[in-house]
Image (spheres, helix red, strand yellow):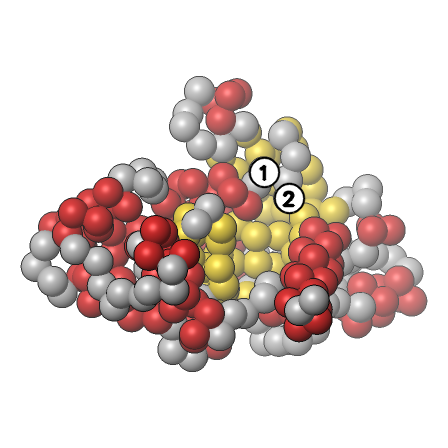
């Protein structure tokens, strides 16, 4: 028995369970939340993480999140400069995509504590625009901040290919909670979100990329530095709209 493999798998399962209980995903309809100051970076409540989507039907945290080298990102940038249109399109789908998170409490569910809400570029820009507006300012302020109404519309309801999330920052200012002890608990009892996602090593991500590009060869342990254009074109077709699908993935 390979004890190291057993321990690795146990760690993966524990990480997944921990992540599920600490993430909030909007349900169909409207909900009201409050974005909180982030304990681990009090200057900015928004945490930008980068992920690779759709490799071997999995999502991987990119080391570029932490300023570290990423072989998948390096390969994508190499494809971009090849001069081949199909390889450029594949690079756009392979390259890491940003997902922004913020610590929130859900109104009516305050007892569940602080969870992290992950959202895409459109919602992120809307939140930043509101905060940059002097008529609103810091909507996360513990005393004079503002709640946010979140409406989640499923693809079936809208008739679109993917679900849609819209927000509206409420005009009235109000405290996060009235009770000081509860407020302190919400501000202090926050996870470091980077602990919720496993970061693979450079070598492990290289194996992931090789397996995706050469699934047959990977079973024999053969690795290729790059794939021919025909392979690139075939793999490119696997992910038709990575950005939209990425939003759908995090809202399932």
Q: Secondary structure at mark 2?
A: loop
The reply to whether discs 2 and 1 touch (Cβ–Cβ < 8 Å) is: yes
Circle number at residue 25: 2
Q: Secondary structure at mark 1?
A: loop
Q: CA distance from mark 2 to mark 1?
A: 8 Å
Q: Residue at x 74, y 47 (%)?
A: 106
Q: Residue at x 29, y 70 (%)?
A: 74
Looking at this rendering, what residue extends furthest in the bottom direction? 68
> Mark 1 highlights which residue?
252
Q: Residue at x 34, y 51 (%)?
A: 216
Which of the two residues, 80 or 166, is positioned nearer the viewer here? 80
Mark toward the start of the polypeptide (2 vs 1) = 2
Q: Residue at x 89, y 62 (%)?
A: 182
Choose mark 2 or mark 1, whichever is in front.
1
Residue 42 placed where, x, y %? Answer: 64, 75
Is residue 94 something that shows in the picture?
no
Residue 14 placed where, x, y %? Answer: 73, 61
Residue 242 placed where, x, y %? Answer: 37, 45
Q: Can you say which quadrant of the picture contains the C terminus?
A: top right
């Amino acid at each position: 028995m390979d004890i190291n493999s057993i321990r690795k798998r146990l760690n993966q399962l524990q990480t997944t369970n921990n992540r599920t209980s600490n993430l909030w995903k909007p349900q169909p309809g409207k909900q009201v939340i409050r974005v909180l100051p982030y304990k681990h970076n009090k200057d900015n409540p928004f945490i930008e993480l980068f992920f690779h989507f759709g490799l071997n039907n999995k999502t991987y945290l990119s080391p570029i999140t932490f300023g570290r080298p990423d072989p998948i990102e390096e390969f994508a940038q190499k494809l971009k400069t090849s001069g081949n249109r199909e390889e450029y399109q594949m690079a756009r789908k392979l390259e890491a995509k940003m997902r922004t998170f913020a610590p929130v409490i859900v109104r009516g569910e305050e007892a569940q504590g602080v969870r992290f809400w992950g959202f895409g570029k459109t919602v992120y820009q809307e939140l930043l625009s509101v905060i940059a507006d002097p008529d609103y300012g810091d909507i996360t302020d513990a005393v004079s901040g503002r709640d946010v109404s979140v409406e989640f519309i499923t693809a079936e309801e809208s008739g679109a290919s993917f679900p849609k999330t819209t927000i509206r920052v409420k005009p009235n200012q109000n405290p996060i909670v009235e009770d000081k002890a509860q407020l302190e608990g919400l501000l202090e009892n926050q996870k470091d979100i980077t602990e919720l996602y496993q970061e693979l090593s450079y070598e492990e991500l290289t194996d992931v990329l090789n397996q995706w590009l050469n699934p047959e060869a990977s079973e024999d342990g053969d690795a290729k530095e790059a794939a021919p254009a025909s392979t690139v074109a075939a793999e490119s077709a696997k992910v038709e709209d990575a950005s939209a699908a990425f939003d759908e993935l995090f809202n399932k």
